Image (cartoon, rainbow, N blue to C red):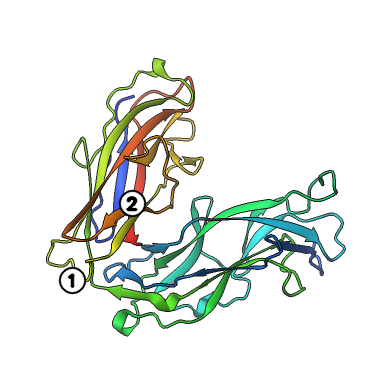
Amino acid sequence: MSSLSKYKHLGLATGLLVMLGAVSQNSYALACKQSGNIRQDIVLDKPIKVFTANTKPGTLLWRSQTYTSTFQCVDDQNHPQGEDAFLHWDPEARMGKIHNSLEVGVTYNSVDIKPVKGLKQSVGPGTACNRDSQGKPPAVTVSYAVYIKATGNPPPPGGKIEDNNAYSVFQVDGVLGLNTKPNVNFNAYISGLGNIQFISCNPTITVMANGGANVDFGAIPQLKAVVGKIEKQMPFSIAANMSGPESGQDCQGETLQASFSSTHPVQDNSVILPTRDSGFGIYISQEETPETPIMMNTPVDLGLIDGTRVEKNFIASLQWLSNAPKVGPFTASANIDVTFK
């Protein structure tokens, strides 16, 4: 095993961190609620400012906190076989009315999913399982966040999104489809899109490590491998620079956040694997909490902009996942998205 490196992809608001080293049914039966509640409102209740240069398709503009909800499901239309529970995307078929400069979606299991009417995501057994001693099926627990990305289309004139609507991004329901009964299934709504405004603030994002823009773990003996052990930790930092001529004048007083993602396999939503059978992986943590992995697609604060530069320190940790890991050079990568809080 030789090294782990990290490359930067310079951009106005995003960076690249690379580390080396059927049967149809006519009735639907599942009703799912959260402690009796059928609605959650995720509200953008304060101004959300995004970079004017961030119109490249797929660029992250904003991400909510992660919500965890537990649902209780019952068969309410005489379907004794039970059903698995699913997130049904865009159940009201209204998300197409959102301004075409924005894509609003859901982060589930650290994966960003664009809601498409008619598609669904399995989340648990619902009522299609063994009951407990009282004859009740187990509850289904789901963790999720809402994201907003650029689509590549220009923002409206003046950069202000004019939208006072609430949009259901998903409904918790059964495999057979949406329940025909009203007001018996949980929906998660996003609203407040009218608080989004594109502003002139275009920081340059850089990554700095022990090898310039590369994190290098050096040679690591295979014989030291013990499952779960943190073999080596290497520091790096992420900086946002607002001193360039095209940085814009609207950055001051804003708080920046960073979130990580990867095109490599990911274990436990946090450990990036060079390959699925590598026997080791790398996780990223904040400097002040080096033993706590940052979940993929989960925002962490970089800092308040009160000058021309914001910088935050992180740790890359190599962890053994096998007592007999593969040997040889390796690479693993993480994308960095920087947004306003």
Classify residue 331 by image quadrant: top left
Q: Give the residue type at disc 1.
A: Gln
Instruction: Measure the C-alpha gap from mark 1 to mark 2.
Output: 23 Å
Q: What residue lies at 27% left-to-right and 71% top-to-bottom?
A: 52
Position of 174 compared to 299: left or right?
right
Position of 162 compared to 303: left or right?
right
Helix or strand or loop: what does disc 2 sit on?
strand
Does the rendering let one see residue 5?
no
- Compare residues 170 and 4 and report the one nearer the observer: 170
Q: Give the residue type at disc 2.
A: Ile
Q: Which mark is residue 249?
A: 1
Does the rendering let one see residue 144?
yes
Position of 296 compared to 132: left or right?
left
Q: What residue lies at 87% left-to-right and 63% top-to-bottom?
A: 78
Number of other residues with Cα within 10 Å of mark 2, as a class: few under 14, some 14 to 19, many 20 or more: many
Number of other residues with Cα within 10 Å of mark 1, as a class: few under 14, some 14 to 19, many 20 or more: few
Q: Which mark is residue 336?
A: 2
Vertical arrangement, residue 21 with respect to residue 311, above or below: above
- Compare residues 226 and 19 and report the one nearer the observer: 226
Quarter placement of the N terminus: top left
